[in-house]
Amino acid sequence: MFKYSGVVVFYLSCRVVLQFGDICLARLERALVNGGHRDCFDIMADVLKSTSNGAKKTQIMYSCNLSFKQLDAYVRFLIRKGLLKMQIKKESKEFHFFETTGKGKTFLKAYKNLKSLLTI
């Protein structure tokens, strides 16, 4: 268990339990030394970064290099935890537009700080 700036993070084999103010994380080191493969936190951070100025699902999918099924699972999780919000935009037709929330931006800052503390 690692505590940084009031944020505790815990994850167990890519099953993430996020409770903000009490974000749980064990084995972040594994993410830093796993041979270049992204773990759940890396993917969540990628999704939140790509939606910081708003994006459609297809744009997020391509920028994060995820399949539709993978992206859908992460988007649902991030929305449920309040890190991402979905809006419906109407132009010529309706489409879903995703944007990082304030809580999501706080997560990105904490993620960046944890990553910088643990990199060699």
Image (tube, rainbow, N blue to C red):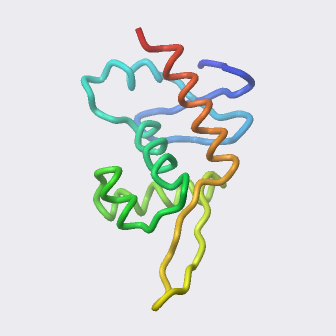
Find the residue positioned furthest to the bottom.
92
Q: Image point 28% across, 32% down: which residue?
A: 37
Q: Where does residue 105 sit, x and y in percent of width and height? A: 63, 43
Q: Nearer the viewer, residue 10 or 20?
A: 20
Q: Position of residue 83 (x, y in %)?
A: 62, 51
Looking at the image, residue 96 lies above or below residue 104: below
Q: Residue at horizontal 28%, vertical 59%?
A: 67
Q: Residue 108: percent from the left, percent from the top? A: 57, 38
In the foreground, 13 or 85: 85
Relative image position of residue 99 (x, y in whole percent): 57, 60
Looking at the rendered image, the quarter that the N terminus falls into is top right
Could you tell me which residue is drawn at 43 percent across and 59 percent down? 73
Quarter of the view holding residue 53: bottom right
110 vs 72, left or right, is: right
The extreme left residue here reads 35
Above or below: residue 4 compared with residue 56: above
